[in-house]
Amino acid sequence: MNHAEAIYQAIPTQVKHQFKDLFVALVSQTIEGSHFSLPESEKANFLKALGQAGESNQYQAIYQAFGKIVSDL
């Protein structure tokens, strides 16, 4: 078991739930805010990718993509 796995196992369930709730809220706010802050071409590409995930009922992909940002830190 590496350090990341050990830490994950030690995180209390309440903290995991809190983090998940805050993460979902942050992703939602980020998507909503993109309407105001992105140039039109970037906004179109972003919303197209989100729409394609939604059409395929792959909503989890949205959170996985944003989670990749966190794991790339």
Image (cartoon, rainbow, N blue to C red):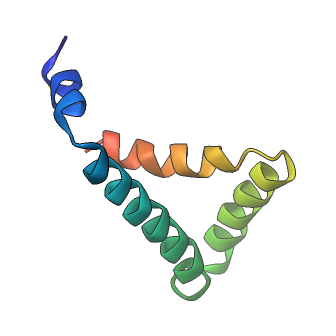
**Total residue callouts:** 0
Assign the N terminus to one quadrant of the image. top left
Q: Residue furthest bottom?
A: 36
Q: Is residue 3 left or right of residue 70?
A: left
From the viewer's side, name the closer residue of 73 and 45. 73
Q: Is residue 1 left or right of residue 32?
A: left
From the viewer's side, name the closer residue of 59 and 17. 17
Q: Residue at x 60, y 51 (%)?
A: 62
Residue 56 in the image, given as x and y percentages of width and height = 84, 45
From the viewer's side, name the closer residue of 39 and 53. 53
Q: Residue furthest top?
A: 1
Residue 18 visible? The answer is yes
Residue 58 in the image, given as x and y percentages of width and height = 74, 44
Give the quadrant of residue 6. top left
Residue 26 in the image, given as x and y percentages of width and height = 43, 69
**Residue 38 position (above or below residue 42):** below
**Residue 63 position (above or below residue 39):** above
Residue 38 visible? The answer is no
Give the quadrant of residue 10. top left
Q: Residue at x 33, y 59 (%)?
A: 18
Assign the C terminus to one quadrant of the image. top left
Q: Residue at x 81, y 47 (%)?
A: 57
Q: Residue at x 86, y 52 (%)?
A: 55
Q: Residue furthest right?
A: 55
Residue 25 in the image, given as x and y percentages of width and height = 47, 70
